[in-house]
Image (cartoon, rainbow, N blue to C red):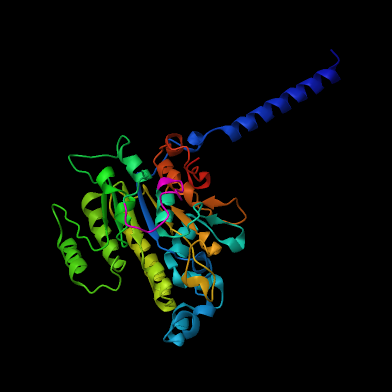
Amino acid sequence: MPISRFLRLATLAIQFSLAVATAFALATPTRAQVSPDHKTQHIIFVMTDGLRWQEVFNGAEESLMNKQNGKVKNEATLKKTYWRGTADERREILMPFVWQVIAKQGQIFGNRDKGSDAYVTNHMFFSYPGYNETLTGFPDDERIHSNDNIPNPNVTVLEWLKNRPGFGERQGEDGNIAAFGAWDVIANVFNPERSHLTANAGYVPLTLTPSTPELDLINHLKLETPRVWEDEPFDAIPFYTAVEYMKLKHPKVLYISLGETDDWAHAGQYTEYLDSAHRVDAYLRAIWELAQSIPDYRGNTTLIFSPDHGRGKAPKKWRDHGQKIPDSKYIWMMFLGPDTQSLGERAKIAPVTQSQIAATLAAFFGQDYVTAVPKAGKPIAEVLPH
């Protein structure tokens, strides 16, 4: 055979092999994205209801810092607190932990101004459908199409993990996975009667044995303080309930849902909306620093942070969300932990979806959720160990 012909055949064979390998890689199921070499042993997952991507990435919006559009009582004080000359300065003064820690040590998705889209795949654009999609990995528009306080017919990734080796009961306790929420519906998102997960939300006291003086005080406050909203207390109540649980039980997965960002936005009160976002950021710092102070958590904990839905644009539609406000499908999400590369604020990348969070959470533990639940979104490979 002439050498030239041999070389042509060899080149064709190599090209064919590469094409097959590439096709195989693209067709390989998500099992390949689930690495057994993970450092994550604990996950803290915090959600804050309806916080817009605009404030997360650009800080306070000037068109809302007034009486007309934001019901602001003292414009000068609000601007002194949250207004700065650039978007980078504004977002950092609003959410310092996010931009001083997560942005430097983790990854942040969802800045649409920089070519990073994050969005929900359900068609409702409000709370229960968003929590369901986040926690199960798929939308269910047929059965989850209202905010009614009904048990979730779908199994969440937390319930699925509970039945995996190493996640269930330990030493006669059932505390490896726990969920806390401001909104009283959060408990039913996890369907505790079926799942047997610890799920505490709203004004319901949390009874633990042994208890602590701090937890006893929180339970009294749940029952005795005046209620601005009948279906949820201020965020401090579920947050510090979760903190006490974390100190006592050291769960492998701790889920916390906060609600004031949504409540104040619906009320059109921009000062309180910004203040609640700032508090959520402080809670993130507090729970992260608590984790690093506990030997069981130090160096092996991943933090996930996201909302359940977005909101409309300023100056009018920012108060609301839902099917009639298409912009409210846009969200954001953040990851910080020992398995996540420090790539910071992502830009010019493929979109990510709310439906991917559940499988990503499981993958941090080396668990292949998508093989068990094929309709769930695939893990976000960029935040996982490689």
User: Percent from the top left, x then y, of residue 217?
Assistant: 17, 66
Q: Is 309 inside the magenta-drawn segment?
A: no
Q: Quadrant of the N terminus?
A: top right
Q: Residue at x 42, y 35 (%)?
A: 372
Q: Say if 93 sits above or below 331 in the image.
A: below
Magenta extent: 136-150
Q: Nearer the viewer, residue 289 or 29?
A: 29
Characterize the magenta stretch by its predominant secondary structure.
loop
> How many labels sit on residues?
0
**Left or right: 339 with respect to 330?**
left
- Whether the magenta-drawn stretch holds residue 137 is answered as yes
Q: Is residue 95 visible?
A: yes
> Would you say 296 lies left or right of 328 here?
left
Q: Is residue 46 left or right of residue 332?
A: left
Q: Which residue corresponds to the image point at 33% horizontal and 59% vertical from the top-left? A: 287
User: Taking the image as drawn, is residue 292 in sight?
Assistant: no
User: Where is residue 131, by image quadrant?
Assistant: bottom left
In the foreground, 352 or 374? 374
Residue with the most extreme top position:
1
Query: In this image, 246 relative to 386: left or right?
Result: left
Q: Is residue 286 above or below residue 135?
A: below
Residue 267 image point, x, y percent: 40, 75
Locate residue 385, reporting x and y percent.
47, 42
Task: Identify the residue at image location x=43%, y=53%.
Answer: 336
Residue 173 occupies which quadrant of the picture?
top left
Looking at the image, residue 352 lies above or below residue 21: below
Relative to the observer, which residue lies in front, 82 or 23? Answer: 23
User: Please, is residue 236 above or below residue 367 in the view?
Assistant: below
